Amino acid sequence: MSVRRSLFVMALLIVLLPIVLFGSAGGGASSSTALADVQLYEVGRGDVTLAVSAIGVLSAERVNSLSFLTAGRVLEVRVQRDDYVLEGDILARLDDTAARLAYEQALLGVERAELEFQSLLKPDETQIRLAEAALASARGAYLSVVTAVTNDQINAAQLAYEQALNTFNILQDRLDDGLPAEEYEMTRARAGEAFVNAQIASLQLEQLRNSTSPQAGAAAARVRQAEQELERVKAGPTQAQRDAAQQAIRRAENQLERARVAYERTVLRAPFNGVISQLNVEVGTLVAPGLPAIEITDVEPLELTVQVDEVDVGRIREGMEVRVELDALPDVILPARLTRIAQTGNISGGIVTYDVDIELQGQDERARVGMTAEATIILQEKRNVLVVPNLYIRLDRRAGRAFVNVLRPDDRIEEVEVTLGLQGQEDSEILSGLQEGDLIAINLGGGGLNQIIGG
């Protein structure tokens, strides 16, 4: 029952059911009350709820007004008002011919740069085979030079060296014999010539022995060069070449990203799941950046903001269970949860209230943004307890006592004191004084049998 309907019923009952004591001061039965004027209620078990109620209007959690980021002509509109869309769905597109071509070209540029890099890393089998052939040829040439030196050549070189050295020694000895000046100079010149010949013969001998003749040395150098070339070919590109190829890929990727951004600006997508609440564009129209084109509303979950009186705000807290009833759907109760209590209050007409945000936990497709709703914030609830409607209870506030009128088997109506437990808005828990199946009564004939709880 809504707050407004509850207030109406309570006012009507106060007018129709004036408070009249039933029975004698000692609690005895009264025979003057006709049973025809008595409304009975059989005591049973049920649920008692202590709650705070407030009224508000259903609203959406998020509402986004979407705009294109570039100017252009609308090529396609894929939605209509009230359509439900999913996050990422395309809602509308501008003419994207130039942007799409630029994006495709940039995509090809990235693929080409990546292929070139992979080709650079892949060994060139043809070059490897050519380098291996060059190395084999160089090694063959070297071997042919080395194996051309015979022992006879070495022996002849040894003999030539010994002869040159012997000639030098003889001439050197003669210089020590005190020769005349003219003969001394001639002998010294011949000795110098003999020394040079001996050095040449020694070098030629060493070259033959070590196979390091000028031809062998050149052949060995060609072998080393061929080996280095083969290693280079097998090793692949240098680090500088790798870096250059990777930098080319990064440049191509940057170009692709710029083209992608330009292409995406021609497309309007849903930022979240929701309903199209406004549609301001149509096919063929020109749009400018920043102008509202489509509005999308997030309706899952719906939320509700109500104002709670300062007397009650101290009794509620975030996370409490809430039950929401809609005036448009009187038989539907939507589960909800209290999500926020404002820190500052609102003052209107001398009354202080606080905004309380409530989020619906269940979704009913009939619930709409803007519907009037009553939120019942559950403070405490007991289930399957002995329950009596508050209408049947009379309170003595001064004494702190509660009474009900019980119909006895002999048709007497007797006022009985009861002990109350949890006292809700419409019903209260009975801890003692009654039993399940007891009949309690109020007088509908003009004289009241009780007071409404809280009266």
Image (cartoon, helix red, strand yellow):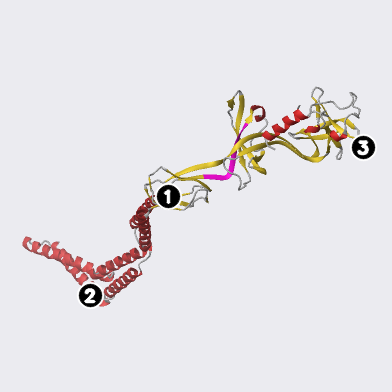
Q: CA distance from mark 1 to mark 2?
A: 107 Å
Which is more foreground, mark 1 or mark 2?
Answer: 1
| SS assignment for the magenta stretch, majority | strand
Does residue 329 appear in this view?
yes
> Residue extending furthest right?
410
Q: Quadrant of the N terminus?
A: top right
Is 139 or 248 nearer to us in this picture? 248
What crowding class fits label 2: few (fewer than 14 Cα within 10 Å), some (14-19), or many (20 or more)? few
What crowding class fits label 3: few (fewer than 14 Cα within 10 Å), some (14-19), or many (20 or more)? few
**At which x and y percent is residue 5?**
69, 35
Bounds of the magenta span? 297-307
Residue at the image position 51 percent from the left and 42 percent from the top: 63
365 relative to 172 in the view: left or right:
right
Residue kind at label 2, given as amino acid type: Ala
**At which x and y percent is residue 31?**
91, 30
In this view, 449 is above or below 387: above
Of mark 2 and mark 3, the one earlier in the sequence is 2
Residue occupied by mark 1: 282
Does residue 206 appear in this view?
no
Q: Determine the image quadrant of residue 211.
A: bottom left
Residue kind at label 1, given as amino acid type: Glu
Q: CA distance from mark 2 to mark 3?
A: 155 Å
Residue kind at label 3, given as amino acid type: Pro
Mark linked to residue 253: none
Residue 302 magenta-highlighted: yes
Of mark 1 and mark 2, the one earlier in the sequence is 2
> Residue extending furthest left?
182
Q: Quadrant of the C terminus?
A: top right
Q: Determine the image quadrant of residue 421.
A: top right
Residue occupied by mark 2: 156
Residue occupied by mark 3: 409
